[in-house]
Each structure stands twice: as structure tokens, then as C-alpha cells.
Amino acid sequence: MLLDVVHVTVKPDFELLLEFENGERRCFNMGKYIDQKPWVRLKSGNTFFGAFVENGTVVWPGNIDIDPETLYDFSVPV
């Protein structure tokens, strides 16, 4: 089941606190993705903290995003 992200809060250590359209709040750790393309670009400066929600997923400036299914499937409830 594909659920849209409706809100994101960026946390230290490459963590995203997510709220999905069904009201669930989950935490996604990007630590294992951050050294891979295209996300490695998020390590410079405060780029990671520029995350926002667009079209049901988390995106960053520079045309970087991550699949909402990945965000849901590999996050943990909070």
C-alpha cells in the first residue's frame, strides 16, 4: 500500500520524522543511504535540513527525492 508523506521534520544524524496520510508517525534513518548517489550530495553543509514534502514524498533542493514506499517500509513507528 502506497501512503503519501504529509509532513517531515529533519532530525540530527540523518533522521527524518515522518507523518503519513493515515496519521502514522514514523522515523526513517537515512544513514545507510547517505553515502550513495544521489543522496551523498545531502552531506554537504546543511543541505539535508532543507527537506520538504512534495507530491507525497520527501524532497530536497537539487531535484533529490526518495521513494515514499522506501520511507514507509524501512521506517519505525514512533
Image: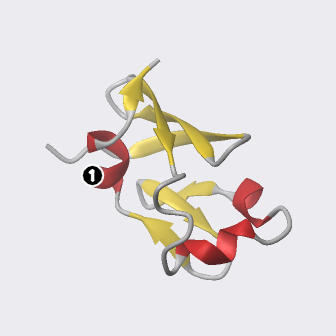
Q: Quadrant of the N terminus?
A: top left
Residue 20 position, x and y percent, is 40, 35
Q: Quadrant of residue 51?
A: bottom right
Residue 78 position, x and y percent, is 47, 17
Q: Which residue corresponds to mark 1? A: 69
Residue 41 position, x and y percent, is 66, 77
As drawn, is 57 to the left or to the right of 64?
left
Q: How is the image coloured?
A: secondary structure
Q: Quadrant of residue 64?
A: bottom right
The residue shown at (31%, 53%) is 70
The residue shown at (47%, 62%) is 33
From what the image shows, is residue 30 above or below residue 77? below
Determine the residue located farthest toward the left in the rendered image: 1
Q: How many marks?
A: 1
* Along the viewing direction, whichever of 72 and 14 lies nearer the viewer: 14
The residue shown at (76%, 66%) is 47
